[in-house]
Image (cartoon, rainbow, N blue to C red):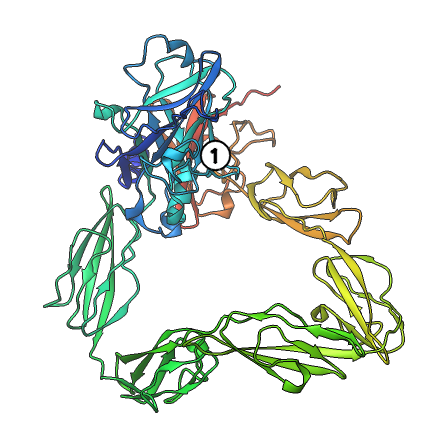
Amino acid sequence: MPRKLPIFLLLSLVLTHWVSAQCVYVAQPGPTDGIDAVCHRYPLCGVPAVPCDTTNRAETKHIYASAKQLGGVTRLMRSFVKFDLSAFGKLDPTALPNSAKLDLYYYRAALAGDEHLNTGNNAFYIERVTGDWAEDTIRWQVPVSSGFLRMPNVTKMTGNAHRILVPATSTATEDVTIDMTDMVRFWLEYPDSNFGFRVVLADETTERQVHFCSSDYDVPQYRPRLTVDFPKVVANAGRDTIVCQGRGVRLNASGGASYFWTAVTSGADILSKYDIPTPLLKATKAQTYEVAVSIGSCKSTDQVFIDFGVPRPAEISIPSSDTFLCLGDSLQLEARGGTFFKWSPSHILSNDEVVSPWCKPTETVKVYVATISAGEKCPGIDSVVLDIKRQTDGKLTFHDTTLCKGDSVQFKASGGVFYSWEPKDSVNREDIPDPIAFVRSDTEFIVEIEDVNSCPDYDTIMVRVVESITVDAGPDLEICQGDTVQLSAAGTGIFQWSNSETLSDAFAPNPKAFPLSTTTYGLILSGTGCPGIDSLTITVNPKPTISAEKTEYEVCVGTEVTLAATGTTNFWWNTGESSDKIIVKVDEVNTRKVFRVVGNDGKCTTDTLDIAVITKRCGKPYVIVPKFFSPNGDGVNDYFVVRDIAKYENELIVINKWGDIIYSTKNYDNRWDGAYSGQLVAEDTYMYVVRVLVNEVWEEERGTVTIIRSKK
């Protein structure tokens, strides 16, 4: 008698679906924890002197996306919804969900007369929100009465992780199920990005709406429901850390919807709570905790070690008791209590790892030192406050200048009570803010400005005396970003260019200029007379920068992919096409093909971008099974040949219509000729099961094959 099909084969699919359904998280929040709101734009908004009602409806039982006509004017409504996924934290990439679906249920008590709005052209978008909001802060715009409350922004990016188009309903009483997989995966991969989503009509110019139940709806089963199916749970108890005596640490677990901490170390300290991801631990000893993370009936555990140490006292000493400094003053500090030192903030210290660094603060600051010796776990810490005396805010509304010989100039300073100018013999009065200077040769003037009970401020003015000379900086120029151009000035004397940081030599008549943006270069030519002054402007045209939403695509072999480039006006692809978008298809399996695009804006040099398309074999079949074969001895198609089966460890079973196994083997060699127990089986259609081992996983394909023996 033929053997019956083993029961494990009959139950394998059922068992597979049962196991995958364990890691399911369902969120259907009620009024106390649901986050949804409706935002209105009424017709009178924006009309001067008329109240503008943009009040949100935080506790409404509705979720609207609407465009209604009121008195010939369109009244728009949009809704905002958020599911709190903060308990998951940042998931391990392998634990991101397989699928996520959102169920919205039509409003069971719709207003009379609205039925015609709920069908037809009422397609709507689910758009990812990118700014924080709360139920009571949503406003369409910012009228005076609502202060700075407003409608949050939504993403402008494309793709189902950011914007999902939901087709129009066909009836007025239609629930919708929306595939939210990409958006939910995005939130769980980047937890700080979850601000929920907005429900808005795809077309707000026609009178249409969708109308669903919110989390405040009276009947719980019709509130918005999010169902997320995870492939597994990966617990993360956080990084091992050390706690010093007198301090606490907050544990930080992630990876699931519920948590439970257990002390692994005997006599461990008590946590603030044991069923939250971030309990507080006031440690008194070294200890280990384990967290059990769950999603549905799936569970994973991880451990974190908290080390413990007792610091030795540290002390900061200073040469004098005066910790009040003027801006620019330095002070040497000294630490005691260890052999290794770490000072902060480091940017005001000569060295932040020595026992006695010099400190030069620019504002009142608290300086810390941590000291530790070899073998110690926790540093001793001390601090001292260094106060900066108020700096006089002196102002000198005068810049370095050049005078012709015999001229005078009046300076102007402000911001203080006391003034002192140097050199005294070159000004008409040295103790006033606005003296007149008589300059016979190049002179640097220094002014000291001091207010009451403050540190003095200083500034300088350089006055040069020269004879008049002739200078030409050259014509204005135009270059591309990143290019260098040589200037060519005419004249005899000493050249001095402004904006010298983008010149090869600020004192040469023909320096090379490499400005990053449009820049005007001033030129002063000094010599035996008054300076010659001229300037030129170099206009910098930006180079085109080609970009693309993605520079690498992984697709199934033979799948068409649209490659799009942006950033300039002209494009050339290595395929010969010259548009910003091209459609490509790669038919080779497991290959990486690069498509190069070159861009040019007609002015500057080109930019190049490579976009790679990587192909893979997708899904089944891993082998190719024929629909029929003809074991009639004519030498053509006499065997049941399964293409590519030799690549894998494999099993083959053939079953007749009564469930009898007529052929079975492991590592099939494509030599079955349609015989059973030495006899040819009848011409008929038979069922087969082919199993191949792919990446340590048995993949299965089932189907039918027909045996035909008649010769034509």
User: In front here: 218 or 561?
Assistant: 218
Q: Is residue 51 visible?
A: yes
Mark 1 Cα-neighbour bin, 10 Å: few <14, some 14–19, many ≥20: many
User: In front here: 353 or 228?
Assistant: 353
In the image, taking residue 556 as reference, residue 576 lies left or right, namely right
In the image, what residue type sits under mark 1? Arg
Query: The residue tagged with tag 1: helix, strand or loop?
Result: strand
In the image, taking residue 632 as reference, residue 474 lies left or right, namely right
User: In front here: 349 or 392?
Assistant: 392
Residue lying at 15% horizontally and 72% vertically, measured from the top left: 284
Q: Is residue 219 above or below residue 530?
A: above
Residue ranking furthest to the left: 267
Q: Is residue 51 above or below residue 467?
A: above
Residue tagged by mark 1?
163
Q: Which image quadrant: the C terminus? A: top right
- Give the image location of residue 431, x and y in percent: 56, 80
Count of numbered badges drawn on the protein:
1
